[in-house]
């Protein structure tokens, strides 16, 4: 049952130090993870160049450096994006649930001439989409597959706030809700909880 004491309005808990710490740690671990992947790619291609008869060093090493640099660049752009992300208010203007089909490879094989072949199966899924229009008229979309939790959480006409650096949306009116999403890590929590059990950030209610 929803908690009646939870009313209408955006929470001041967004200013809690836990959110700043979460963003800082997210940026740090994004960069560390990128460095690990980059180092793995560089070392792997160098070893491949030493033992392979198809590619020698420094060609293999250069490829590894390129791939490693790409992962580091992606992490840097993600960090810059979080730092440049602004807080803005918006409104849920539409929702859609569509049945979709796509090919999914199940097996692959190489024929006697060296050609690669893949066998596919068709799989059906439901694509849920929630459309949010910000104060400048831009449409932002939340999409999920085969999970209508977020789709049902938001209603057309809901006022929401996007919190910069967190890439999340807080509902203005939570008075009839029994669940709440953590605005830091997006974990689904009970509306009775005050702290996200996963990341320990305050729940904005």
Image (tube, rainbow, N blue to C red):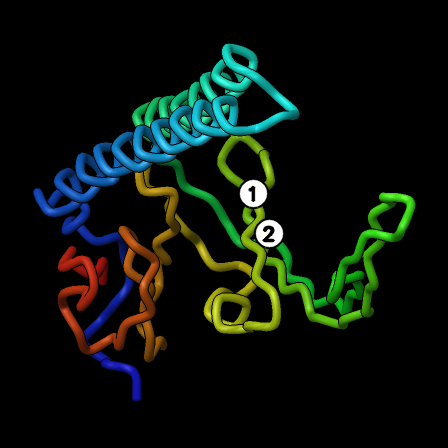
Q: Give the residue pinned by disc 2.
A: 131
Work out whether residue 118 or residue 49 is closer to the camera in this orientation and state it.
49
Q: Is residue 56 above or below residue 145?
A: above
> What residue is shown at x 43% (from left), y 19% (from top)?
69
Q: Are marks 2 and 1 in contact (CB under 8 Å)?
A: yes
Q: Residues within 10 Å of mark 2 (few under 14, many from 20)?
A: many
For this orientation, the residue located farthest to the right is: 113
Residue 167 screen position, x and y as percent: 38, 42
Q: How far separated are the C-alphas under marks 2 and 1?
A: 6 Å
Residue 81 screen position, x and y as percent: 39, 26
Q: Quadrant of the N terminus?
A: bottom left
Q: Quadrant of the C terminus?
A: bottom left
Secondary structure, mark 1, is: strand
Going from N to C along the chain, the mark reached first, 2 or 1, is 2
Q: Quadrant of residue 144?
A: bottom right
Q: Quadrant of residue 65?
A: top left
Residue 175 screen position, x and y as percent: 31, 72
Residue 158 screen position, x and y as percent: 47, 59
Q: Give the residue pinned by disc 1.
A: 140
């Amino acid at each position: 049952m929803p908690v009646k004491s939870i009313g209408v309005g955006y929470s001041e808990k967004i200013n809690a130090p836990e959110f700043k710490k979460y963003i800082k740690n997210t940026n740090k671990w994004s960069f560390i993870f990128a460095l690990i992947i980059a180092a793995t790619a560089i070392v792997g291609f160098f070893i491949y160049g030493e033992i392979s008869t198809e590619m020698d060093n420094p060609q293999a090493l250069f490829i590894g450096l390129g791939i490693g640099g790409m992962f580091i660049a992606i992490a840097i752009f993600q960090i810059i994006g979080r730092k440049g992300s602004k807080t803005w208010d918006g409104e849920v203007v539409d929702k859609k649930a569509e049945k979709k089909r796509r090919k999914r490879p199940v097996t692959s094989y190489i024929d006697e001439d060296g050609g690669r072949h893949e066998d596919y199966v068709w799989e059906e899924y439901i694509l849920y989409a929630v459309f949010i229009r910000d104060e400048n008229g831009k449409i932002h979309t939340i999409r999920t597959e085969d999970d209508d939790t977020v789709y049902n959480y938001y209603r057309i006409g809901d006022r929401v706030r996007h919190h910069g650096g967190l890439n999340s949306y807080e509902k203005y009116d939570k008075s009839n809700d029994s669940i709440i999403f953590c605005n830091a890590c997006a974990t689904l929590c009970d509306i009775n909880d005050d702290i996200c059990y996963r990341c320990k950030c305050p729940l904005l209610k």
